[in-house]
Image: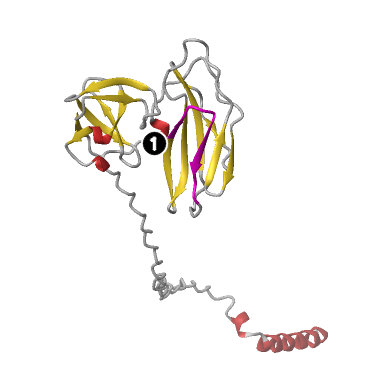
Amino acid sequence: MRLMKKILLPCLLLMLVLAACAPAELATATSEPATPQASETPSPEPSSTSTPLPTETETPPPSSTPLPSETPSPEPTPTYAILRGTVNVEKVSCRYGPGAMYLYLYGMVQGANQDVIGRNEQGTWALTMSRGDNKSCWVKTDLMDLNGEIMSVQPIDPDDYNLPKSPFYGPLTNVGAKRNGNEVVVSWNPLILRAGDDSLQTPYVLQVWVCRAGEIVMESLGAYETSISVVDEPGCAEPSHGRITSAEKHGYTKFVEIPWP
């Protein structure tokens, strides 16, 4: 009995010491657990996000639009007159070209009226046409009385003389030219015609562009032989040149260029 007391007493002392040393949490462990209060989560304040101001885009300086270039205005088309002419001599020949060397188309008598629709470069010959007719021919200007100035009428290019074409003969052959100072001699082989094909008019016609007093002048020349002399002076910026054809009663052979010296 005494032994048990000796044993129990130290045990009780030990228990008291342990109880005194236990942490406060253990002392309250047996009490009713406290209901945890819901923690109030603070609402996040809206962030004061600063909206960026629109950036000022630099406006590029206006491009200098080039002014439209001044297009030169086309030269106005000249307006030409159509005159009325009356034959003032007893009889006159109306020809295919502006010159007595061209083939004859028909004749007119004094008092005949014609429309004057063209002229040669110098105005010495007039291209005429009867009203209601589709054929035109050339009359020497001073053989008609005109109701206006001949130079107001349209000039006609030699390519538009409307010469009739020969269906039976080819161009002239062996056409050449030699210069002697201001003189150019043009020569060629003769055109041999069949019987009955002779026009009985000027057989050879030259159209030449030659220099006179510093300007190129166009002339029509006729020849009965197989050579002709042409005056061609120096001093023009453009070169002189010419061409030749032969006539038979049906028309003209093809032009041949003259090798101008």
Q: Nearer the viewer, residue 67 or 204?
A: 204
> Residue 83, percent across and down?
20, 35
Residue 119 picture quarter: top left
Q: Residue at x 37, y 32 (%)?
A: 99
Q: How many marks?
A: 1
Q: Which quadrant would residue 132 be assigned to in this image? A: top left
Residue 38 colored in magenta in the image: no
Is residue 231 inside the magenta stretch?
yes
Instruction: Give me the residue at 49% from left, 53% from top.
Output: 237
Nearer to the camera, 44 or 166: 166
For image coordinates 47% across by 10% down, the residue present is 196
**Which sits in the foreground, 233 or 53?**
233
Q: Is residue 240 visible?
A: yes
**Left or right position of 64 against 3:** left
Above or below 218: residue 143: above
- Under circle 1, the secondary element is loop
Write down the residue under mark 1: 157
**Hey, which residue is sitting farthest right in the picture?**
3
Amino acid type at mark 1: Asp
Magenta stretch: give its range.
221-233
Task: Give x and y (percent) for residue 244.
Answer: 51, 31
Q: Is residue 121 left or right of residue 230?
A: left
Tell me which residue sits at (42%, 32%) in the image.
Answer: 159
Give the crowd class for mark 1: few <14, some 14-19, many >=20 residues within 10 Å: few
Chief secondary structure of the magenta portion: strand
Counting from the top left corner in percent of width and height, residue 47 is at: 43, 74
Quadrant into which the C terminus falls = top right
